[in-house]
Image (cartoon, grey):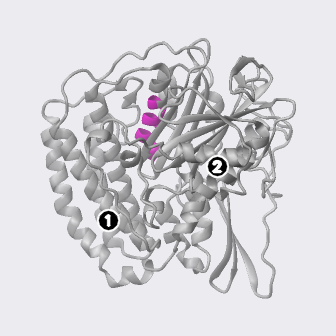
Amino acid sequence: MSRLDWLPDFLARLAAEHLLAHSGDEAVLAPAQRLVLDPEDWGNAAKVAARMGLRHVGMWADPSEGAGIVTRVATGADSTPDPQGIAVYACLEYQGGYVVLETAVPLDQPVLPSQTPHFPGLARLERHCHDLTGVTFQGHPDPRRWTRHQAWEEGEFPLRTDFPTAGRSVRHVGADADYPFPKVQGSGVYEIPVGPVHAGIIEPGHFRFQAMGEDVLRLEERLGYVHKGIEKIAVGRDPAALARLAARVCGDSTVAHTWAACQAMERATGGAVPPRADWLRALMAERERVANHLGDIGAICNDVGFGFAHMQCARLRELWQRRSRALFGHRLMMDAICPGGVAWDLTAEAPALLLADHTALRRAAIPLFDVIDDHPSLNDRLISTGRLSTAQVRALGCTGPVGKASGLPFDVRRDCPYPPYDRLEVVVPQEREGDVAARVRVRMSEIQESLVMMDRLLMTLPAGETTAPLPPAPPGAVGLGLVDGWRGEIMTFVRFGADGRITRFFPRDPSWFTWPALEQLILGNIVPDFPVCNKSVNGSYSGEDL
């Protein structure tokens, strides 16, 4: 049974709305099916997709100015290269099957209908796309800039080829004080600005609260203060250098982001990964999941004054990361994955050490989790706090613990499995309450399931090589990486140029969709509950501040 059995129905629905979608080469963006659309049909295609229940995975643009990227015409055939076009993509998922919608707009008039009215979680991605490429989305409900924090001029777009990688000096970069935050009017309503600089060591982000008494009436986030230019500085890199860059998109997800980038490059080039490397990649990804879930569980407990659980989780996480440093060269396992395989292999003694670690973690964590799950003071603060409904996470496209805690248990490892998960049983936890307590329970369940999978990976670890050469990339080759990180689904797009180097890299972190969820789940809660609500989501600033 194919995961795209629903595709003919989707195409029929498009045809019923007089929308023509031409199927592209299935192998080009595997495992997704490419559908080429006319620009004027862009918004209506999203409307049809939303009505059918598809989930939006993300969108991005690929400026082809001077890069020779082929622009598809209405016949669905490839025309001659158009040096003045911008290709635009949108990825959608349904029942574990993916489609990528593709269209193109001229550089001198890059206008498309917005898909945000049909997929609210897409709002910031479209704004980011406009700020970096200049594509204007008509009908978008929020025309304010998102990524451009006065770092470049209003009419400049960094991802176009005429913009230098080092940027240009800006005549004046003052405080970003004129961002138009909407205000809630009414007697007794007051405003609380928080950040962007915080008391801790976290990255900068601004939160603007409107409250009455202690009740939060509205919250709006302002991110992008640490814009790194990831997409721009990726251009011209070779595969190994791109993998190193991907590892630094988000430090606490370095394994997942590197894996997604390497997977995209391997699919673009037709490269094969040795089985032992697949097993080791999964082992590292599950170790990353366990480490971060331990940290989040402890921090959530600490935010409501239960310091005992915080200290215990911190102790267990520290021991876990020390083992990662000893066996994989880095506490976060940064740069341990490379194109074609992995950079580190396990010694003959390592599997026994890791299996013993898994047993020790179970022995320590399961009684701790029992306490956390049934402690009166924790229940009082976590149950019913920060509730997010199934309808809300579906509209926003949330995955990971946020989606699973609200009744949407999508997991790439199970629903669109990639090696070695296609040979493992992946048990996905699901809760329905959608509150902070449910998000804690999902994390605790995932830790236990990851331990089971890691045991299985170690006991079935194949022998053999850990890397294979990456074949030369055909000019214009594209690839799509889809990996389940501990925050949820990561999608990565790469395109190679004629010289075998990268011309486009777009990593979509799960935080693009979970940050807006925080704005919704805090409503009706009290201001003092914001820290624990925030930590229960734990969106990545860096993952979104590309």
Q: Is residue 440 above or below residue 96?
A: below
* Badge 2 element: helix
Identify the disc placed on residue 13: 2
- Residue 475 part of the magenta-drawn span: no
Total numbered circles:
2
Classify residue 329 as left or right of residue 403. left
Relative image position of residue 527 (x, y in whole percent): 59, 78
Residue depicted at x 27% and y 69%: 369
> Horizontal placement of 463 versus 153: left or right?
left
Q: Secondary structure at mark 1?
A: helix
Tell me the residue at 41%/73% (across/down). Answer: 437
Indicate the amino acid at tag 2. Answer: Arg
529 is higher (above) or lower (below) than 204: below
What quarter of the picture does the N terminus occupy? top left
Q: Are marks 2 and 1 in contact (CB under 8 Å)?
A: no
Identify the residue at horizontal 58%, vertical 63% (top origin): 517
The reply to whether the magenta stretch includes residue 256 is yes
In depth, the one of 488 and 326 nearer the eye is 488
Image-based side of 499 in relation to 265, left or right: right
**Residue 332 located left or right of residue 488:** left
User: Tag 2: Cα neighbours inside 10 Å, few (<14), some, or many (≥20)?
Assistant: some
Dominant secondary structure of the residues highlighted in magenta in the image: helix
Please indicate, yes or no, whether residue 323 appears anywhere in the rendered image.
yes
Give, as a single range, the part of the protein colored magenta. 251-263
What is the x, y in percent for residue 442?
A: 37, 64
- Given the image, on which type of amino acid does mark 1 rest? Met
x%, y% of residue 19? 72, 43
For residue 311, the mark is: 1
Residue in view at x 70 percent, y 38 percent: 20
